[in-house]
Amino acid sequence: MPEVYHLIVNPAAGHGKAPEFVQNHVVPLLHHLGIAFELHETKGVRDAGRIGAEILTTTSFPVKVVIAGGDGTAHEMIEGVLKAERDKKDQALGRWELVILPLGTANALFSSLFPQPPEPPSEPSSLVSYLSDTGPDVLYQLSSLLASLKSTTPARRLPITLTSLESPISPPTEPIQSHIVLSTALHAAILSDSEALRSSYPGLERFKIAADQNLGVFFKADVRLIPPHSGKIKQYDPSVGNWVDPFTFGEDTLSGPFAYFLSTTTTPRLEPSFVISPLLATLPPNPSDPPTMDIIVLRPLRDPAVRSALASRGDEAASETWKSRIRQVMGWAYKGGGHVDLTYPAHRGETEVKGGGEVVVETFRCGGFEWVPTDAEHEPSHIVCADGSLHTIERNGKATVQVMDPGHDNSDDGFWVWA
Ligand SMILES: Nc1ncnc2c1ncn2[C@@H]1O[C@H](COP(=O)(O)OP(=O)(O)OP(=O)(O)O)[C@@H](O)[C@H]1O
């Protein structure tokens, strides 16, 4: 069967430029190369999932799917495919080769796969001469498509994280899937508050405003880390610059409160300049090992200045002290991800880079975690964010989050990307 590219175009993503970009740059390129394609335009929320499910049941595999939208479009497509696969008992998942066009707002997946424009190819080809008049910005946006046109197999699996929400009174939810980020605490609270700001601040500014509202919040939960399918939980130790056995907690439980708690499997950066999980790039997991997630954790009571403010002046002072600390720590995420190397001063004052004190950020590599809210009245501690979609843990419930095991039969089924 001749190869067919499926183009999923979200006209509402980013600044609404996806249809124009596809018509001006993608369609002519595929025509030029004589590659057949099918255009699918999303009509509303979750429609990318309907389209994904339709492709699942009508195509042969492997299949190439171009995501002309943002992270949410890819998320909805994968969600729809996995749900259709679950619902149809005899349906195999198949191998999905995803081309990502950065036509959304944050474009976290694209900027992680292509942090810089790739080197232009030097060998003459029909593709190179066709693209000779294309500007550098458009060429960069086409990076993933060009990689798919040049190399036949994407080397990289896109690990999928599954989250189930449980409570004593309701049956467990269907697994919630994510491929970029699964977070609770500050990140989830910012996403939650920023939704209300979307219409007045369509750009990234709304995240900054929502952050200011939540920086001093202590999120009440306990966490149990889950080891990978084979292997052990690891923690990053800045003093040796590598992964070691966990050293900031006993047993496998991290006690709250938490300020920040975010897991990622693939994307060191959530925006081009916000490198929240740098070790995915600098000390990456071995692709032949079972999949893992990196978790970035900030627990405010590990800060000596916060403990001292709490003891002498109470909750509000502790929250204010933490606010300025976390602002400064997060600033390092915008400086290439240096926050993972910060250590606390012995008593008070500024954090140090690889100093002698306790680590500020606890960074773990593991197979998953359980997040168990410990204060039923504190709603923000119950919010879970899966690739930007928000979910709420019921009272006395918990979230169990685990990276999907692709199986031990070396199956190629799943989602693959170029990088
Ligand atoms: N025709 C449509 N009209 C309105 N909304 C749509 C339509 N098609 C899809 N959507 C919705 O658009 C939303 C935004 O898409 P997406 O997340 O890809 O872009 P973004 O938010 O701008 O980018 P990013 O996720 O990279 O920050 C999705 O949640 C999706 O449900």
Image (spheres, grey):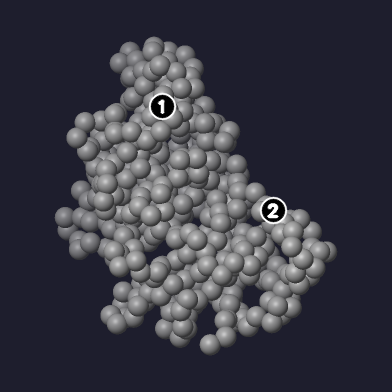
Left or right: residue 348 versus residue 328 is: left
Circle 1 SS class: loop
Mark 1 touches mark 2? (CB < 8 Å): no
Residue 233 position in % (x across, y down) = 29, 41
**Outermost residue, bottom direction?**
1
- Mark with earlier residue (1, 2): 2
- Which residue matches tag 2? 119
Left or right: residue 301 versus residue 418 is: left
**Outermost residue, front direction?**
123
Quadrant of the image occupied by residue 389: bottom left
Specify the amino acid type for callout 2.
Glu
Left or right: residue 401 versus residue 168 is: right
Residue 276 position in % (x across, y down) = 49, 40
Residue 252 position in % (x across, y down) = 22, 38
Q: Nearer the viewer, residue 67 or 399?
A: 67
Can residue 363 be seen in the rendering of this structure?
A: yes
- Which residue matches tag 1? 240
Against 172, residue 63 (above or below) is below
Q: Report the quarter where the C terminus lies.
A: bottom right
Can residue 276 be seen in the rendering of this structure?
A: no
The CB of the residue at mark 1 lies under 8 Å from ligand 1: no
